[in-house]
């Protein structure tokens, strides 16, 4: 036997895989992992099929299909009034995850510190650790998960290299306000701290709120990577396609890694998505589409013993079960699958220290009937 010295000794299998597998084994309704249970627009599927049939089956250009990058530039300017140059400032990636990994890899060295707000999406910390970087968690509290920026400033040291932000936020559904942006501008001013802004839920935002993309703020955009995912925009999480925006100085370093990590990402989907986006405005419909689901799900849940937390964006609804049980959230979530047949994610999984506030996350990117069936079961609690 060879001796293995794990680079990630404390990391197990992601909670999404664990809970989805358990859901499958128990034939439970899966509101755990975030993915739609309905189909994407058939016109989109047809556009990708056409792209394959018409010979778009070899390597795409390293930064991505030209036309798709141009459409992203146009869309970014339309929504956020900023020009990103498709040749030098936009790269198509294998999902948001690869974009995040690549941005971190391009800049984080051993000993560099990265501030991560927790609860946090689970792919940030392992990437930082693999590079010898240090995760500096900043713990947020339910129900609002508001950031105290004065306290964040206190985490800054000479080694602080990056801050990772995520609005709309997975798992809590919180969103950044103008005050957060102003504070972020203030604390990063006259520093070399970079920002990785995970904006994969940029169009899943409710009650008429505006998404404060980092792209809107030149003082922040000049030091930032912005991450987007076609999985969320087109209801196609399994296609694993996304993109990254960054000023050319940052993007050229990003591409040095990207070209040897994946080189380029799959061609027919890029071509198909580009052809589809030329004729279909997908973005405007998204907030309404998901708000209807959120409102319906919240109405249904209000009849249960769960306490609902606010949900201002993303397709996740968090609930407190402290009026129902004292069990640890991981145990409670597992029992919910085994005894009631509904799968969720225990929010302690998003904290380095597995802090347990007795909160579960449900994904509502599901058919109305799926949500109704799930809540019918949850009523038994
Ligand atoms: N982003 C999805 C979630 O939060 C899952 C992604 C994954 O399974 N890695 O549920």
Image (cartoon, rainbow, N blue to C red):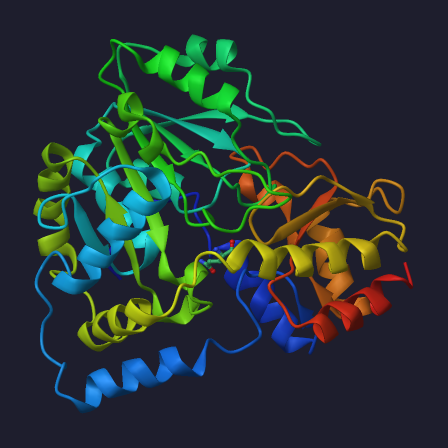
Residue visible at 74% across and 75% down in the picture? 369
Is 50 left, or right, of 306 in this rendering? left
Where is residue 51 drawn, in percent x and y? Answer: 21, 83
Is 30 left, or right, of 287 in this rendering? right
Q: Quadrant of the C terminus?
A: bottom right
Q: Quadrant of the N terminus?
A: bottom left
- Which sits in the foreground, 216 or 168? 216
Where is residue 339 drawn, in percent x and y? Answer: 81, 68
Where is residue 187 drawn, in percent x and y? Answer: 37, 12
Residue visible at 67% across and 61% down in the picture? 293
Q: Is residue 298 above or below residue 342?
A: above
Is 77 left, or right, of 267 in this rendering? right
Q: Is residue 1 above or below residue 77?
A: below
Quarter of the view holding residue 114: top left
Is 138 left, or right, of 294 in this rendering? left
Examine the rendering and report whether any part of residue 7 can be seen. no
Residue visible at 36% across and 17% down in the picture? 185
Where is residue 308 drawn, in percent x and y? Answer: 78, 44
- Which sits in the foreground, 26 or 245? 245
Residue visible at 34% across and 85% down in the picture? 46
Q: Is residue 184 above or below residue 98?
A: above
Examine the rendering and report whether any part of residue 307 can be seen. yes
């Amino acid at each position: 036997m060879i001796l293995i010295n794990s680079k990630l000794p404390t990391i197990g299998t992601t909670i999404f895989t664990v809970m989805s597998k358990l859901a499958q084994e128990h034939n439970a309704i899966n509101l755990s992992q975030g993915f739609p249970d309905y189909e994407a627009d058939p016109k989109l599927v047809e556009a990708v099929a056409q792209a394959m049939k018409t010979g778009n089956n070899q390597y795409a250009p390293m930064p991505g299909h030209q036309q798709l990058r141009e459409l992203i530039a146009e869309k970014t300017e339309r929504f956020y009034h900023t020009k990103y140059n498709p040749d030098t400032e936009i790269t198509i990636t294998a999902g948001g995850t690869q974009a995040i990994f690549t941005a971190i890899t391009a800049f984080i060295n051993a000993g560099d510190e990265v501030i991560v707000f927790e609860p946090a999406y689970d792919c940030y910390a392992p990437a930082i650790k693999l590079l010898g970087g240090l995760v500096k968690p900043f713990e947020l509290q339910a129900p609002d998960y508001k950031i105290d920026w004065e306290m964040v400033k206190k985490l800054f040291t000479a080694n602080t290299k990056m801050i990772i932000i995520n609005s709309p936020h997975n798992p809590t559904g919180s969103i950044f306000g103008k005050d957060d942006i102003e504070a972020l501008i203030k604390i990063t001013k006259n520093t070399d701290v970079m920002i990785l802004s995970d904006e994969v839920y940029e169009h899943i935002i409710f009650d008429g709120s505006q998404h404060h993309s980092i792209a809107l703020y030149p003082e922040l955009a000049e030091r930032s990577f912005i991450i987007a995912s076609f999985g969320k925009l087109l209801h196609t999480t399994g296609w694993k396609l996304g993109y990254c925006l960054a000023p050319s100085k940052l993007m050229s370093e990003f591409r040095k890694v990207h070209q040897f990590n994946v080189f380029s990402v799959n061609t027919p989907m890029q071509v198909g998505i580009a052809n589809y986006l030329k004729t279909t405005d997908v973005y405007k419909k998204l907030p309404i589409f998901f708000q209807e689901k959120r409102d319906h799900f919240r109405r249904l849940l209000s009849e249960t013993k769960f306490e609902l937390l606010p949900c201002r964006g993303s397709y996740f609804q968090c609930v407190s079960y402290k009026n129902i049980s004292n069990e640890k959230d991981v145990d409670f979530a597992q029992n919910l699958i085994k005894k009631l047949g509904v799968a969720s994610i225990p929010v302690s999984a998003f904290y380095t220290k597995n802090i347990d506030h007795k909160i579960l996350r449900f994904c509502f990117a599901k058919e109305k009937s799926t949500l109704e069936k799930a809540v019918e079961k949850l009523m038994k609690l």
